[in-house]
Image: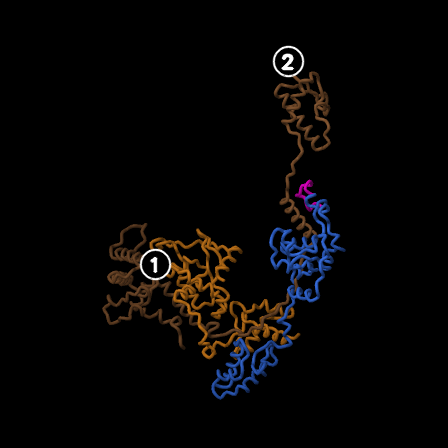
Chain colours: A brown, B blue, C orange
Amino acid sequence: MSDTIDNNIDEFEMPDPRLSANGDLEEGERLIVDIVGFEGPLDVLLALSRTQKVDLKQISILELVKQYLEFVNQARELRLELAADYLVMAAWLAYLKSRLLLPEEENEDDISAEELAARLTYQLQRLGAIRERAAILMSRNQMGRDMFARGAPESVIITRHHTYELSIYELLKCYAEHKTREAVADIRFHKRNVYTLDQAIKRLSDMIGYALDWTSLEQFLPEGLDDENLVKSTKASMFTATLELAKMGKAELTQKQTFGPLFIRGRNQEEENG
Amino acid sequence: MDNQEQLRICEALLFASDRPLSSIALAEQLVEGSDVGAILSELQDKYSASGVNLVEVAGKWMFQTASDLAFLLRKEEEKERKLSRAAVETLAIIAYHQPVTRAEIEEIRGVGLSKGTLDVLLEATWVRPVGRRRTPGRPMTYGTSEEFLVHFGLNSVKDLPGVAELKATGFLDNVNTSRLNLLDDVKPNEEQPDLPMDDDESSSEEQVIS
Amino acid sequence: MDNQEQLRICEALLFASDRPLSSIALAEQLVEGSDVGAILSELQDKYSASGVNLVEVAGKWMFQTASDLAFLLRKEEEKERKLSRAAVETLAIIAYHQPVTRAEIEEIRGVGLSKGTLDVLLEATWVRPVGRRRTPGRPMTYGTSEEFLVHFGLNSVKDLPGVAELKATGFLDNVNTSRLNLLDDVKPNEEQPDLPMDDDESSSEEQVIS
């Protein structure tokens, strides 16, 4: 079978070809510092661990740390630009290395160096395991490459007949709402024919001087009004005007019975007279 | 490879192909000297009683659903659908203002009318083209159909309640009574009667509908 | 209709389709009381030696060319969807760890995930967003689709190669994505089920895919 490299399970089992291409060279120089080919520090670590040619469970973390730091140093000597990730990992591994070499201090808060090493191993194993599965997955027969579905599917032709549900209520409601909106949009303000309060106060003030006795409010209303709206407006304004004049102390009001006529007389005059 | 293997390959090729295959094209995929004709006729026998048959069309071969089962591939579906709000409003405007052109509907609604909205109403057979306006461009006018009246149980469009009646039945609750006069503009367009449509126009419209 | 007729109907429906059909969908087309399971297993037998096989994928049923003919049918000229190494690895992580967040994928691979990688898998419709994690930021989680199962001939994700071993070794345990987790205590994520996606989120995500 002409398998592509993706299907080659061995790729993940063998030492990484990116590292071992210059197999003749010394251990330290054997690294091909081609970081472009690697996908981050974990990828490099996994590739390096493969060169130990042992089961991932038995890899020597110290050895791995040494290899990685060499890798990074060499890259720096060659003035290759290393992403920050690589340097962070290098710093962390250097820290781990020192912890592993020094006698462990009695400190319950700290995680032991062995535990940290075990976690790194776990991560490498996990990545290794998923890569194996990825290779196995891609080596499976694939639809459209190894096996095929019906090339000319006969689709089910569905003829849909739509019936529409709408009640007369919904229809009318909708139209009414439309009309409501339209009405709102069409509001026009007509100039209303009114008798203003200022007009009323002036008229009442002028006339009250002559009303020394109680006089019905009706008597003060202007005559000859035929617009009913204007009559209403005039009454309202004249009533308000009497209240206003009473407040100013220019008039006195009295009403003998509920809903009965309202009587007014001027006050200033009386005081002057009295 | 034995003959049976060649048959299996033929079978797979015909199954996976997106077009009918000639016996020559098939032969190219088989070991030299295979009797394609014999293989095809054996395959045809194998499938003759199945739900799928191997048929020869225009000198080429393909699998096809057995003709007595063709009904499986054709389904009629009755589906109840709900009209969009725009469609209901458009229908109402056509009902009250008919005959009315598309431009007039848009003006009344104050928004553009998407093609689909009118199509849905035409498909529902509630709305139909009724003529052409005697104005520049002779635009098509729309009105309601007999199906519309039947669906809503109306004898004629004159049975639709007027605006005052809508108010009386509470449909126009939110509208101030004093403005009702502003609403009372529902009167049919008193213009010259629209032109009747020619027969061919009418049929072309139906094509749009379908 | 006798049982043979029901079998022909199943055969025709499955043969006509280029995607798997569920036994429920098939049963809807048969006379009431038909034993779909028995019919399917009879059909499977009937085709077991053919160039076309009836297979169960994604919990559904479909005809496809026999896998032993792959080397004969493989279309060399058809440009194969070549996935990058990152994409293959990401696909495997999503398949085995699903539902999994972007941050978790990055944690396992030890490297950031470029936007294109996930896009390729989403575009291939092998991967889909499946919900949101109940953690701060409510990150989107990803899983595999039915198309994924069909493409790789799997009945369910439980049938992924070596899934049991991975589980046994603890490699499928919760992924700790807190930064510098090597230094932190490994705190398993809380076992709250992920949030399902809202409809609108789902559709907006689909727009990204399409």
Is B175 included in the stretch rendered in magenta? yes
Q: Amino acid at mark 2?
A: Glu
Sequence-wise first label, 1 or 2: 1
Q: Nearer the viewer, mark 1 or mark 2?
A: 2
Q: Which residue is mark 1?
A: A119
Image quadrant holding the N terminus of chain A, namely: bottom left
Hey, which residue is sitting farthest top in the picture?
A274
Q: Is residue A62 visible?
A: no
Q: Which residue is mark 2?
A: A271
Q: Residue A79: where, in percent of width, then height?
A: 26, 61
- The subunit carrying tag 2 is A
Q: Amino acid at mark 1?
A: Arg
- Does residue B175 appear left or right of residue A27 in this picture? right
Neighbour tally class for label 2: few under 14, some 14-19, many 20 plus, Cα within 10 Å: few
Marks 1/2 same chain: yes
Residue extent of the magenta highlight: B169-180
Q: Quadrant of residue A60?
A: bottom left
Q: What kind of secondary structure does the magenta stretch mostly adopt?
A: loop
Q: Residue C85: where, in percent of width, then height?
A: 39, 67
- Pick whichever, C167 or C31, lies toward us: C31
- The subunit carrying tag 1 is A
Query: What is the secondary structure assignment of the residue under circle 1?
Result: helix
